[in-house]
Image (cartoon, rainbow, N blue to C red):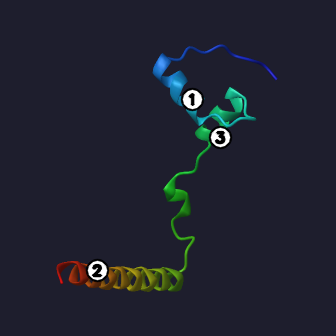
């Protein structure tokens, strides 16, 4: 395996350093970050039925959260 020397701005170095996990080398950080997948890679991986169930669950959560908030406001306002 060969090695290359690269130059980074101080800002880029600090960002890379913050992304580095304890056991990782900087090379491993670059590989991990550069090989992230695009959201486009996930298009179509969830079935229509799953999307509908998630949407219903989100709607129910939002409705419940709204009711709790309304009740809290009523209690506060007396």
Which mark, residue 16? 1
User: Foreground residue, 4 or 32?
Assistant: 32
Q: In the shown orientation, is residue 36 left or right of residue 56?
A: right
Name the element at disc 3. helix
User: Foreground residue, 12 or 74?
Assistant: 74
Mark 3 vs 2, N-terminal side: 3
Q: Residue at x 56, y 14 (%)?
A: 7
| Mark in front: 2 vs 1 | 2
Q: Which residue is mark 2?
A: 72
Q: Residue at x 66, y 13 (%)?
A: 5
Name the element at disc 1. helix
Which mark, residue 32? 3
Mark 1 vs 3, N-terminal side: 1
* Rendering quarter of residue 73: bottom left
Residue extending farthest to the left is 77
Quarter in which the C terminus is drawn: bottom left
In this figure, what is the number of numbered marks?
A: 3
Mark 2 and mark 1: Cα distance apart in space: 44 Å
Q: Residue at x 59, y 28 (%)?
A: 17
Q: How dense is the environment of label 1, judged by Cα within 10 Å: few (below 14), some, or many (20 and up)? A: some
Residue 6 vertical placement versus 24 (above, below) = above
Q: Are marks 1 and 3 in contact (CB under 8 Å)?
A: no
Q: In the shown orientation, is residue 48 left or right of residue 34?
A: left
């Amino acid at each position: 395996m060969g090695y290359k020397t690269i130059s980074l701005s101080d800002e880029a170095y600090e960002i890379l350093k913050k992304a580095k996990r304890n056991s990782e080398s900087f090379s491993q950080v670059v590989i991990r970050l550069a090989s992230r997948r695009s959201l486009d890679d996930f298009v179509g991986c969830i079935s229509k039925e799953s999307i509908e169930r998630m949407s219903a669950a989100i709607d129910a959560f939002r409705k419940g959260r709204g009711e709790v908030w309304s009740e809290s406001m009523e209690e506060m306002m007396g």
